[in-house]
């Protein structure tokens, strides 16, 4: 029902207002794949609406628990909140940043030991790979996992990521995210 309402406002390939390419088709895929997220849309007199998204209280499968600290960076608030929520519920300590600049501020101000950087690839101003290189200078042992909703040419340069960093394509299920995070943390050859 929510997807139908969204499609009446914009086509399935139109981007969400203020986003860097996040579209209704991707939103629909995420909602469908999460099988149970709740979405509350709050409309105001402005040309945009706020979406509040929450994941189910319990994840529907057994996934390895984590205790490591993960810095999650995504310029799409919906994706950032979902990733933070999923990882926190699985026991990870989570820091969320809405931009590469914000992530760098966490690191430069002496954030706690970071074990993993989970970053979107394509963001305004500083790309994910550039952010990873800068964070790796501050935290040499950090593991890197990239995520992206783009395919093809936009991501081609990231297919052979330096230092063994991996890429998880969006949209992904909570299970896919948790398994990718665990694999990146357990991989001794991370970036």
Image (cartoon, rainbow, N blue to C red):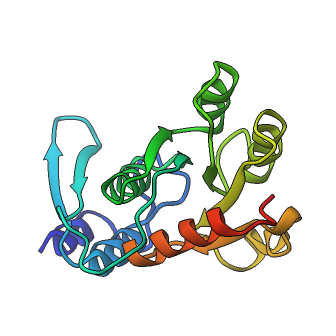
Q: Is 70 left or right of 90, judged from the image as shown?
A: right
Is 11 displayed left or right of 160 in the figure?
Answer: left
How many numbered dots are placed on residues in this image? 0
The quadrant of the picture occupied by the N terminus is bottom left
Task: Please tell me which residue lies in front, 120 or 132.
Answer: 132
Q: Which residue is drawn at 36% across and 51% down?
A: 88
Nearer-the-camera pick, 163 or 39: 163
Residue shown at the point (78%, 53%) measured from the top left: 129
Q: Quadrant of the C terminus?
A: bottom right
Does 27 appear above or below 126?
below
Compared across the picture, whether 30 is left or right of 133 comes to left
Identify the image quadrant of residue 35. Answer: bottom left
Residue 95 point in image, percent of width and height: 48, 39
Q: Is residue 44 above or below residue 89?
A: above
Task: Name the residue rendered at 24%, 62% in the picture.
Answer: 55
Image x and y of residue 118, in percent: 59, 55
Q: In this view, does 91 lie above or below 35?
A: above
Q: Which residue lies furthest to the top in this view?
A: 109
Which quadrant of the view contains residue 48?
top left
* Percent coordinates x, y for residue 74 in the rendering: 53, 49
Residue at 71% from the left image edge and 70% from the top image edge: 166
Viewer-nearest residue: 37 or 108: 108
Estimate the x, y position of residue 82 in percent, counting from the top left: 36, 57
Q: In this view, does 76 lie to the left or right of 44?
A: right
- Name above or below for residue 152 compared with residue 94: below
């Amino acid at each position: 029902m929510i997807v139908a309402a969204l499609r009446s406002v914009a086509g399935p390939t139109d981007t969400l207002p203020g986003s860097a390419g996040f579209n209704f088709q991707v939103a629909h895929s995420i909602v469908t794949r999460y099988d149970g997220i709740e979405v509350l849309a709050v409309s105001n007199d402005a040309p945009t609406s706020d979406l509040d998204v929450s994941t189910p209280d319990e994840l529907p499968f057994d996934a390895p628990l984590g205790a490591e600290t993960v810095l999650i960076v995504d310029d799409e608030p919906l994706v950032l909140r979902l990733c933070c929520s999923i990882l926190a519920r699985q026991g990870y300590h989570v820091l969320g940043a809405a931009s590469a600049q914000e992530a760098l501020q966490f690191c430069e101000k002496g954030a706690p030991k970071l074990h993993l950087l989970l970053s979107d690839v394509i963001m305004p101003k500083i790309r994910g790979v550039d952010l990873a290189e800068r964070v790796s200078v501050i935290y040499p042992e950090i593991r890197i996992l990239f995520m992206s909703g783009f395919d093809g040419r936009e991501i081609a340069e990231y297919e052979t990521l330096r230092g063994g960093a991996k890429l998880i394509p969006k949209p992904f299920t909570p299970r896919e995210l948790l398994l990718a995070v665990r694999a990146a943390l357990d991989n001794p050859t991370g970036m």
